[in-house]
């Protein structure tokens, strides 16, 4: 591995979790002999929904999670973290520190992984615009956070990983 490749996996091993160029997706586990004809379409629709809205459905290694449609003029952020006490507080404290309001949120866990979807108002209470890159860095580098994504006009953009977790 020369380090310049990109990897997408839905069933990571320890090497993939820690690889700086790996994007880890929820594993669907939807293929059975009876469902082969429908599995490809279902998988594509499920991945598209994950990329566009952050929703997770039919995964065997991530919790099922979905928020209603993102309100107009809001930004959706997803955060994958270790399922340990206090993580949700750390995530919401980072948003409060940036003087941002959470419009709606959901947090679900499955085993050692927790997944958060948060819709935020992109302006501070003082009316100032925020720097998404700085906010995402702050969230992603929290101890226990594994990755984050910022979803806005360009679905799938804004992915960041904390390889130290």
Image (spheres, rainbow, N blue to C red):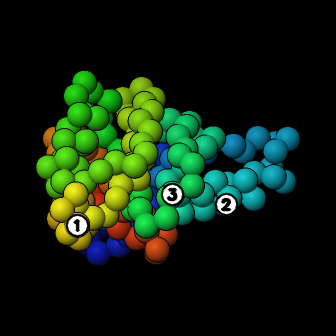
* Element at label 2: helix
Q: Observer-nearest residue: 2 or 129?
A: 129
Q: Position of residue 66 (x, y in %)?
A: 55, 44
Mark identifier at residue 70: 3
Structural distance between the alpha carbons of marks 3 and 1: 20 Å
The reply to whether discs 1 and 2 touch (Cβ–Cβ < 8 Å) is no
Say whether residue 142 is visible. yes
Marks 3, 1: nearer the viewer: 1
Badge 3 crowding class, 10 Å Cα cut-off, few under 14, some 14 to 19, many 20 or more, is some
The answer to whether 39 appears left or right of 138 in the picture is right
**Residue 90 drawn above or below residue 97:** above
| Percent position of residue 69, x then y | 57, 55
Q: Relative to residue 7, is residue 12 depicted above or below?
A: above
Quarter of the N terminus within the rendering: bottom left
Badge 1, how many Cα within 10 Å: few under 14, some, many 20+?
few
From the viewer's side, name the closer residue of 111 and 16.
111
Q: Which residue is mark 2?
A: 44
**Looking at the image, residue 82 lies above or below residue 5:** above
The residue drawn where x is 23% and y is 49% is: 95
Q: Position of residue 151 (x, y in %)?
A: 42, 64
From the viewer's perspective, is the residue at label 1 or at label 2 nearer?
Answer: 1
Earlier residue among tags 3 and 1: 3
Sequence-wise, the earlier of marks 2 and 3 is 2
Marks 1 and 2, how far apart at CA:
39 Å
């Amino acid at each position: 591995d020369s380090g310049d490749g990109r990897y997408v996996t839905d069933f990571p091993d320890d090497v993939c979790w820690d690889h700086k160029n790996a994007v880890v997706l929820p594993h669907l586990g939807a293929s059975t002999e009876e469902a082969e004809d429908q599995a490809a379409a279902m998988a594509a629709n499920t991945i598209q929904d994950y990329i566009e809205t952050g929703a997770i459905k039919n995964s065997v290694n991530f919790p099922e999670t979905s928020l209603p449609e993102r309100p107009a003029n809001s930004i959706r952020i997803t955060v994958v973290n270790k399922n340990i006490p206090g993580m949700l507080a750390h995530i919401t404290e980072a948003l409060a520190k940036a003087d941002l309001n959470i419009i709606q949120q959901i947090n679900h866990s499955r085993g050692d992984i927790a997944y958060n979807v948060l819709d935020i108002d992109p302006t501070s209470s003082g009316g100032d615009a925020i720097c998404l890159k700085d906010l995402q860095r702050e969230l992603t580098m929290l101890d226990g956070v594994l990755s984050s994504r910022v979803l806005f006009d360009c679905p799938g953009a804004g992915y960041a990983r904390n390889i130290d977790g």
